[in-house]
Structure formats: C-alpha cells, structure tokens
Image: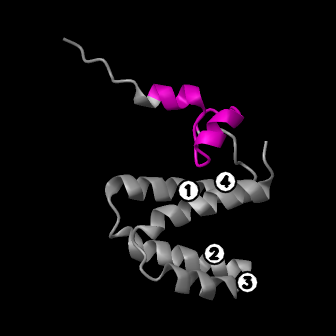
C-alpha cells in the first residue's frame, strides 16, 4: 500500500481537480495557503470548499465530499477500511478510486436495484 503522504497527495490532487473547475483564482489561493501552517491550510481549504460547494453540480459535490471524508479517514487512521463492514478495501480499488469508503462487496450491494414485490 502507498505511504500516507502519497495517499494524502493523491486525495489532495483529486480535490484540487474537482475545485479547479470552479476556481478562477486557484493559483492565488494555493500560493496563499502554501505560506501557512498545516492546520491553517486545512481550515482555509475547508472554508474555500464551503464557498464553492454551492456552485458545484450534484455529482461534483458528492465527489468532493468523498475526497474530504477520505482525508479525514486518513488522518484518523481509518483509511482503507470499509466504513460499512470494517473489511479492508482492496489496494487495487483504492488505486482506481482513492476516495473509496466502501469495499467492493458493500459498494456492489449499494448499486443493486431493490426488487419490487408484485
């Protein structure tokens, strides 16, 4: 499994990718944030996220929230563990979707249509 720093870097890159669509001043903000401490950077980044969330589409909002939650799990030492069943999430799944919160089995069960009774 990649190091915590490598995972954090991928998640932050994904977050930046999502937000780039909506930030005209991304470079200015990045320069401003890079001069601050890690705690202030996280706080400032969350404030910025809150401001742009209202302009995001539904799928982008979900994707951004998944990334933010993955960063929280990483900091809490729960990254790579399914939030539903506590099973490890396969490294291959995390490679494709680093913000994944569910193992493949739990994710598949959420995608199955519910059978209707006749």
Question: Is there any visible trace of residue 8 in the rendered image?
Answer: yes
Question: Is there any visible trace of residue 89 in the rendered image?
Answer: no
Horizontal arrangement in the rendering, residue 38 relative to residue 100 (left or right): right
Measured Cα–Cα span from mark 3 to mark 1 = 21 Å
Q: Nearer the N terminus, badge 4 or badge 2?
A: 2
Q: x, y (%) of residue 77?
A: 76, 52
Horizontal arrangement in the rendering, residue 7 relative to residue 13 (left or right): right
Q: Residues within 10 Å of mark 3 (few under 14, many from 20)?
A: few
Residue at image mark 3: 37
Note whether 34 is above or below 78 in the view shown.
below
Q: x, y (%) of residue 22?
A: 39, 71
Residue range of the region highlighted in magenta in the rendering? 84-109
Element carrying mark 2: helix
Element carrying mark 4: helix
Of residue 19 and residue 100, the one placed in the foreground of this image is 19
Measured Cα–Cα span from mark 2 to mark 1 = 13 Å
Tell whether position 95 is magenta: yes
Name the residue located 34 percent from the left edge and 24 percent from the top edge: 113
Measured Cα–Cα span from mark 3 to mark 2 = 9 Å
Residue at image mark 4: 73
Q: Residues within 10 Å of mark 2 (few under 14, many from 20)?
A: few
């Amino acid at each position: 499994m990649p190091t915590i720093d490598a995972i954090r870097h991928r998640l932050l890159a994904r977050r930046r990718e999502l937000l780039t669509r909506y930030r005209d001043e991304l470079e200015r903000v990045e320069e401003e944030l890079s001069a601050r401490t890690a705690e202030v950077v996280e706080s400032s980044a969350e404030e910025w996220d809150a401001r742009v969330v209202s302009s995001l589409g539904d799928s982008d909002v979900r994707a951004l929230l998944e990334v933010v939650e993955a960063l929280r799990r990483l900091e809490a030492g729960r990254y790579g563990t399914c939030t539903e069943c506590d099973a490890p999430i396969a490294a291959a799944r995390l490679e494709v979707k680093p913000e994944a919160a569910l193992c493949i089995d739990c994710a598949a069960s959420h995608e199955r249509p519910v059978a209707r009774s006749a």
